[in-house]
Image (spheres, rainbow, N blue to C red):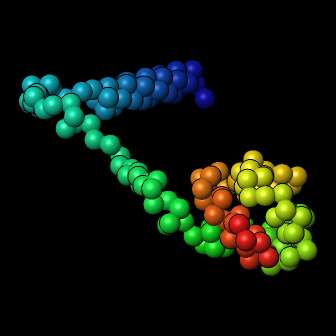
């Protein structure tokens, strides 16, 4: 191969590389350039109160308890069936079984105040409030009284 043809081949390669780079720069420049800002009108500012622009995602309604009617409306049986039944039916972790007078007799003898206090604060393996922190003291008391009365007590 002659030197002239080698030089010609080299020049062609250089021009192809330079042309490719220039073409790539032009394509990138056009692709990333912003359109003329005069083409798009600016959005008009509106005077909307902040309260209307910012709305909550959700609303929570709280139930207000009427304490005068609490003792009448609380069902110790329902509370026990939902919260206490797992341990107090099977005797799980030493819990006295509902209806077993022998297991409940010494507990009932301690009195309602201590029984309710133990249920509220927890005792031995029983967690405070039977593991349901949302129960009120009066709901705990209703459940304890119902279970004790079903087990031979008269609280």
Q: Is residue 47 left or right of residue 15?
A: left
Image quarter hosting the C terminus: bottom right
> Considering the image in quadrants, where does the N terminus appear?
top right
- Residue drawn at x 19%, y 38% is 52
- Is residue 84 depicted above or below 67 in this figure? below
Q: Nearer the viewer, residue 126 or 20?
A: 126
Residue 85 appears left or right of 19 = right
Can residue 147 be seen in the rendering of this structure? no
The x, y position of residue 66, in whole percent, is 42, 55
| Residue displayed at 85% across by 69% down | 104
How many marks are shown on the rendered structure? 0
Q: Is residue 137 visible?
A: yes
Q: Where is residue 16, by image quadrant?
A: top left
Residue 142: image quadrant is bottom right
Q: Foreground: 28 or 153?
A: 153
Residue shown at the point (50%, 66%) measured from the top left: 72
* Residue at 13% from the left image edge and 32% from the top image edge: 48
Judge by depth and name the residue closer to the eye, 55 or 34: 55
Question: Which of the pair 55/113 is nearer the observer?
Answer: 113
> Residue 128: x, y in percent?
74, 50
Can you tell which quarter of the image residue 146 is in? bottom right
Q: Position of residue 82 (x, y in %)?
A: 64, 70
Q: Residue 77, relative to residue 28: is it above or below?
A: below
């Amino acid at each position: 191969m002659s030197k002239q043809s080698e030089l010609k081949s080299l020049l062609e390669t250089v021009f192809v590389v330079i042309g490719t780079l220039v073409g790539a720069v032009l394509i990138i420049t056009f692709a990333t350039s912003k359109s003329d800002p005069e083409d798009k009108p600016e959005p008009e500012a509106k005077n909307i109160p902040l309260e209307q622009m910012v709305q909550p995602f959700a609303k929570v309604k709280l139930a207000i308890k009427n304490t005068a009617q609490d003792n009448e409306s609380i069902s110790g049986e329902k509370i026990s069936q939902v919260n206490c039944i797992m341990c107090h039916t099977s005797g799980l972790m030493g819990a006295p079984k509902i209806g077993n007078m022998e297991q409940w007799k010494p507990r009932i003898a301690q009195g309602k105040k201590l029984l309710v206090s133990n249920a509220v604060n927890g005792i031995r393996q029983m967690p405070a409030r039977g593991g349901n922190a949302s129960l009120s003291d009066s709901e705990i008391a209703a459940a304890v009284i119902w279970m004790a009365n079903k087990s031979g007590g008269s609280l």
